[in-house]
Amino acid sequence: MKFGGTSMAGTERIRRVANIVRTQAAKGDEVAVVVSAMAGETDRLVTFCREANALYDPAEYDVVVASGEQVTAGLLALTLQAMGCRARSWLGWQVPIRTDDAHASARIEEIDAPALIASMAMGEIAVIPGFQGLTPDGRVTTLGRGGSDTSAVAIAAALKADRCDIYTDVDGVYTTDPRIVARARKLKNVTYEEMLELASVGSKVLQTRSVSLAMKEKVRVQVLSSFVDADAPGADSLPGTMIVSDEEVEELDMERQLITGIAADKNEAKVTLTRVADRPGAVANIFGPLAAANINVDMIIQNIAKDKGETDVTFTVPKADLPRTQALLEERQEAIGFFRMISDDRVAKVSVVGVGMRSHAGVAAIMFKALADRGINVQAISTSEIKISVLIDTDETELAVRVLHSAYGLDAEVEAAGEE
Amino acid sequence: MKFGGTSMAGTERIRRVANIVRTQAAKGDEVAVVVSAMAGETDRLVTFCREANALYDPAEYDVVVASGEQVTAGLLALTLQAMGCRARSWLGWQVPIRTDDAHASARIEEIDAPALIASMAMGEIAVIPGFQGLTPDGRVTTLGRGGSDTSAVAIAAALKADRCDIYTDVDGVYTTDPRIVARARKLKNVTYEEMLELASVGSKVLQTRSVSLAMKEKVRVQVLSSFVDADAPGADSLPGTMIVSDEEVEELDMERQLITGIAADKNEAKVTLTRVADRPGAVANIFGPLAAANINVDMIIQNIAKDKGETDVTFTVPKADLPRTQALLEERQEAIGFFRMISDDRVAKVSVVGVGMRSHAGVAAIMFKALADRGINVQAISTSEIKISVLIDTDETELAVRVLHSAYGLDAEVEAAGEE
């Protein structure tokens, strides 16, 4: 079970969390709990580090910021004990959670935890601070902001857990953002690949990294709300969204939809280079320098060559990286050999995601017809095996999401709206 | 070098501390620094623990409260790095500082730190959180409130340090409280024994435990102020008070005073039991139950037996324990066999302390005459090898301290007042 910073913000909320944990343990399950720092605490500690040293040493930064999760782990263990549960905390170096030595953004390498497993087998609830680990030479690491989801999945894998329940401030994964589409439905199941595509296009329920790890380690992850009363009737019927493998989702969910969800992302900007020479190496000249500058290029569209062996190249980059992208390409205008650079940060990427589309033709056609019927202009298209994304004007984002949600039959029945 | 919570309260003050450390290291010294948590932080964490679990598990309490020093250790290392020094933090479990498993009040058992020593030999400043350690089975311990002084002395001993500089909010040890006697003088040197007697009677500059450890391990401790500018001229001339062995103080200080200092303590209460049977076992019947209840009896005065084989017994206990003491003795009035119990919490203990009195007769006579000349009534007397204490009316405390300070020739020359 993993609880985020909002759930751990203060002793009253920690009591709520302890109650959820106690209820789970009372069913006879062995339980390990991974916790974040109190909401706001990591920011406070990061500010101290910046004040102390603007170019801070990430090894010492890790020593400072890892303390936030240490506090909540101890407090949750104390609170569980106050409720009559046996519980103890296991800090990153005590488990140990072995990582590489990339301080402030470490990767978990190994969790071999016989003492932890033995303690849980004896009925002790294990409380583990998320986000933190131990380098080969015995120093504290952290996994990067939001790393506690990844800690939880890694620990679930090491423990061969039946399930990794991630408690958040939403009660599951929806077909789309319920603030945009009132008739969005909560999904019972979603595959790892779908979750990755939904996350990477803006449905930020879980850290992308934690979903990749869950897929690799075949950890069944459930997303659910920590603000549901653990003692309420029916609270034990897995009320969230299960993230599982393709195979399992097919077994569980015979009447699966063609499309699982619609995601929208307004954080990209479009760049078009006109009249790029259509010769070998021209494209490498564009994207090589961007990659070297750590600018993540997402969609790339190259039209077929026009007359005179020239072509237009369009691509998207994160909005925050647009100024750097423009500067880099202007410097190289001659080397690349383009005529003009046209940028546009008033674009949005809307994507339909679903493993169902693998075995169905015509998914893309539905999308293009639905958008065309409402006069929404598609500026660019990119596809993967389980996703089709289009770039549109940012003002039309919500309209496009609503239109597509209906077109793929995702709208909840009116009488069932708000239910599952 | 050890810095307390007031010196570490916020990044601006930590910069001040880093400047003092940098100045010391720039002289070519190998430096280890022990730090407390930011002022107020330990209280905040203790409050969290109490809220989580009123009868808290000290093992989890230690996990929570040890985080305060972890934060300041990382921040001081970062700040030193920002000033161009090489520095790194060493947490209790990394050194390791091995303790017993008496959580929340652990005792240091061993510090064998080859890695720490090697790092310092290579020119790295070691920053070590005070107050924390590691049990034999790998859990976090703390040494009890104020334990960072003890951490500093223990680390100085393990490193065979030339000196353990303890930075506080006073600039040294004085002949008496300068708020009572304006002409109090800062002592250049004081022996461990004198420091213990001065501390135990109310001059709370250092933790008693840290002084005992320094005496046992022969660590030379200097008390000085962290609010002196490290760059000021003369700031490197050991401006504080050195706490050293008898032998060293004799070498250093040929013209040593008879008396080193005068201390006053208003935290005791006096209890008199009248007409106690003067027979074997009677006194054990009084003090046995008090010891069992963890009530610390300080002075004990038994007058010679009067007629009829009866005597009066007077003793002092901490003021806070007076109600418990009264209740315990009332319960046992018959078993003990006393006539009346008379309590008085308006008493003060005034002590003259100095190793010089070992070799000089007449020290006590000076005290009694000086007090009698001013009409101060002595209610009880107790002595040790280097201390004479008297119990007086609490209203006469300041007068008694001033009278004794003059009587033993401790007053600073008027023209040199405030200097040393």
Image (cartoon, coloured by chain):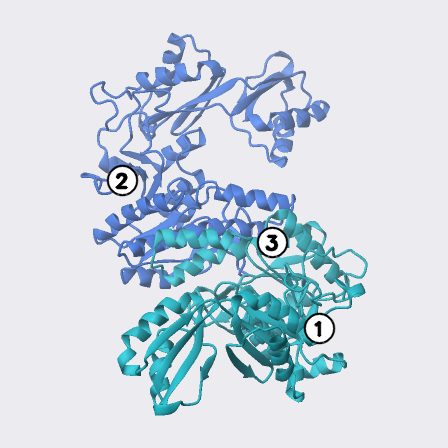
Chain colours: A blue, B cyan
Foreground residue among A125 and A227 = A227
Cα distance in 3D space between marks 1 and 2: 87 Å
Q: Earlier in the sequence, mark 1 or mark 3?
A: 3
Residue B386 position within the rendered picture, expressed as x and y whole percent measured from the top left: 60, 82
Which residue is identified by label 1? Answer: B410
What is the number of callouts on the image?
A: 3
The label nearer to you, 1 versus 2, is 1
Which residue is identified by label 2? Answer: A248
Image quarter for residue A406? top left
Q: Are marks 1 and 2 on the same chain?
A: no
The label nearer to you, 1 versus 3, is 1
The label nearer to you, 2 versus 3, is 3
Residue B322 position within the rendered picture, expressed as x and y whole percent measured from the top left: 39, 68
Residue B18 position within the rendered picture, expressed as x and y whole percent measured from the top left: 68, 55
Cα distance in 3D space between marks 2 and 3: 55 Å
Which residue is identified by label 3? Answer: B8
Asked if one can make out residue A407 in the rendered structure from this viewpoint, the answer is yes
In-image side of A261 versus B215 (left or right): left
Q: Secondary structure at mark 1?
A: loop
Say which amino acid is labelled 1: Leu
Q: Secondary structure at mark 2?
A: helix
Say which amino acid is labelled 3: Met
Could you tell me which residue is drawn at 44 percent across and 38 percent down?
Answer: A208
Could you tell me which residue is drawn at 23 percent across and 27 percent down?
Answer: A419
Say which amino acid is labelled 2: Glu
Could you tell me which residue is drawn at 63 percent across and 36 percent down?
Answer: A292
Image quarter for residue A199? top left
Mark 1 neighbour density, 10 Å: few (under 14) some (14–19) many (20 or more): many
The residue sitting at the left extreme is A233
Q: Chain of mark 2?
A: A
